[in-house]
Structure formats: C-alpha cells, structure tokens
C-alpha cells in the first residue's frame, strides 16, 4: 500500500510540473518602445520634453512610464493582446483609454503605428 501511494505521489508531482509550464512567447512586440513629444504647456515655460516608455513582456503584461526631465511623473501596468496583427494595449490605472496599434518595419527602425497612420512609438 505504501508503494502505491508513493507511486501516486510521484505521478501527481510530474503531472503538476508538466501542466504548469508557460508557453514561450516570441512575439515581435516584446521589448522597450519609446515616444518623445514636446508638451505644449511645458514647452512654453521650460522646453522640457515629455517622453513615454512601454515595456512589453512575454506574459502579455507590461509597464508604462511617463517622464518629464528624466523623472517619472506617471507609471502604470498594462495588459496587451494581439488579434490579426493588431495589438490592443489596456491600461490598469488612470483614465488612459485602450490603444490599438500595428507593428510596422522600415529599413532603419521598427514602429508601432496607430490605426490613423500616426507613429505611436519606436523600438528603443
């Protein structure tokens, strides 16, 4: 009887270990993307650029940072998903609406492009 429970425990352990593996995600959006804009209000006074950074990770999550003068002024997490080569970024905090972008390649860079054709961010 002892041998039966030992064998059952080993089989159960192996089954749990095999079921808990996360599939590898090699999506081309993984990495750090940036956008630097000149905020009109700040530009009038200090000429300080506002920059934004999105860090996409392989478990469909990420971190968004907004910087002013190299200091973080806002940060939040986001979820992302891809359907038919369109990425949807949904923020967890703030009043930021979901954003839909597509990955575009040019000869010298990669960019995320809004549905309107505007550049959303470039790969750092």
Image (tube, helix red, strand yellow):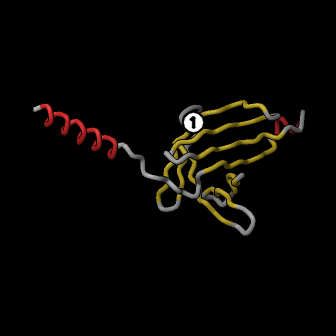
In this view, the residue in front, 54 or 14, is 14
Q: Is residue 62 left or right of residue 16?
A: right
Position of residue 2 in the picture relative to residue 92 (left or right): left
Horizontal placement of 119 versus 94: left or right? right
Residue 62 appears at what percent x and percent y?
57, 41
**Residue 49 percent across, percent down from the top left:** 82, 40
The residue that disc 1 covers is 77
Quadrant including the N terminus: top left
Outermost residue, front direction? 3
Residue 50 is situated, as x and y percent measured from the top left of the image, at 78, 39
Query: Which residue is painted at 72% across and 30% down in the image?
Result: 73
Q: Position of residue 110 (x, y in %)?
A: 68, 60
Residue nearer the viewer, 57 or 92:
57
In the displayed structure, 84 sits above or below 74; it is: below
Secondary structure state at the residue bearing disc 1: strand
Residue that protrudes farthest toward the bottom in the picture: 107
Nearest to the observer: residue 77 or residue 13: 13
Q: Which quadrant of the structure image shows residue 78? A: top right
Q: Residue at x 70, y 54 (%)?
A: 122
Number of marks drawn: 1
Q: Residues within 10 Å of mark 1 (few under 14, many from 20)?
A: some
Q: Residue at x 39, y 46 (%)?
A: 21
Q: Residue furthest left?
A: 1
- Residue 32 against residue 46 in the figure, above or below: below
Q: Residue at x 19, y 39 (%)?
A: 7
């Amino acid at each position: 009887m002892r041998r039966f429970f030992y064998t059952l425990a080993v089989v159960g352990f192996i089954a749990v270990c095999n079921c808990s593996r996360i599939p590898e995600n090699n999506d081309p959006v993984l990495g750090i993307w940036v956008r630097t804009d000149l905020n009109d209000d700040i530009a009038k006074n200090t000429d300080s650029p506002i920059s934004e950074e999105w860090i996409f990770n392989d478990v469909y999550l990420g971190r968004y940072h907004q910087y002013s003068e190299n200091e973080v002024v806002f940060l939040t997490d986001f979820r992302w998903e891809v359907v038919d080569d369109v990425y949807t970024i949904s923020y967890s905090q703030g009043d930021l609406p979901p954003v839909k972008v597509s990955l575009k390649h040019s000869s010298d860079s990669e960019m995320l492009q809004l549905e309107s054709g505007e550049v959303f961010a470039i790969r750092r």
